[in-house]
Image (cartoon, rainbow, N blue to C red):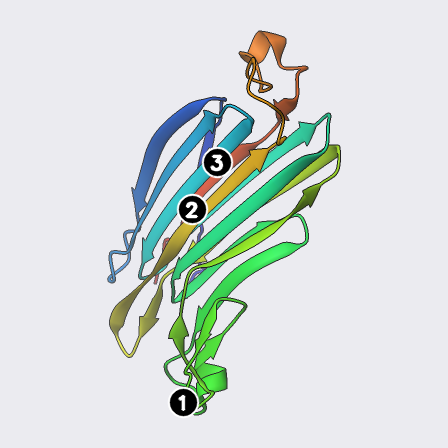
Amino acid sequence: MRPRLRPTSRFPLAFPASGGHSARSHSSFAGETRMLYELRETRGGATFEISQDNSGDTDSSFTLTFATATEMQFHLYAEPRPYAFSGKFDDVVGDAFYDPSAESPSDIYRGTLVHIDGVTDQPDGFEGRSFDGELEPGTHTLTVRSHGAIDRQTIVDGGGLVRLTLDTGAAPGPLPVPLPPAAWPALLTLLAVAAARYALKSS
């Protein structure tokens, strides 16, 4: 058996911007990965929204690194559609991992986005969740990852949605946000690229 190949499709990012990318594997399970993103300015800062869907042997990763020049508040919302999903902003993580072959509920459903049944006090699925905090000036990174799976010869979907909102909390006025690329040394500077990856199996 020849080693498993992992072709990668990469695309650059601008700010503000929106778009979508997709790719398919060519294995017998014909998995597909799709990614949508919207990066936009707001009155007090910026909002980044990323949605990923993967099936079968595909996975995707979106990484956004930026710098801030002032203190800001952040609001991170993560909503999973696992098999496996993770949204990470600096040290804050919203993730969900589903293992249908495990025996106990705590092994079947894992991660910070697990929903706990109010009667049994046991994990019974996943839910969207918000995380809020203060952001110091400096460089910060948002990473969204997900992948599908193959369970007993059945294609399993994975993915989720992440929305990161940054706000200075300042009074209304001119937008304190990045200018076009030629003038990016502003409040927010975009530095990153993203990638949609899929696995290509070969026998």
Mark closest to the chain's N terminus, 2 or 1: 1
Q: CA distance from mark 2 to mark 1?
A: 40 Å
The quarter in which the N terminus is drawn is bottom left
* Image point (37%, 81%), residue name: 100
| Real-space CA distance between mark 3 and mark 1, rounded to the nearest whole angstrom | 36 Å
Q: Secondary structure at mark 3?
A: strand
For the residues bearing labels 3 and 1, Cβ distance under 8 angstroms:
no
- Disc 3 marks which residue? 48
- Residue located beneath label 1 in the image: 119
Q: Amino acid at mark 1?
A: Val
Question: Which residue position is annotated with label 2?
Answer: 197
Task: Find the distance from the CA under tag 3 to the CA under tag 2.
Answer: 20 Å
x and y percentages locating residue 15 in the rendered image: 50, 22
Mark 3 is surrounded, within 10 Å at the Cα level, by few (under 14), some (14 to 19) or many (20 or more) other residues, namely: many
**Closer mark to the observer between disc 3 and disc 1:** 1
Foreground disc of the pair 3, 2: 3
Q: Nearer the viewer, residue 174 or 95?
A: 174
Q: Amino acid at mark 3?
A: Phe
Specify the label residue 185 is tagged with.
none
Q: Would you say residue 106 is visible in this rendering?
A: yes
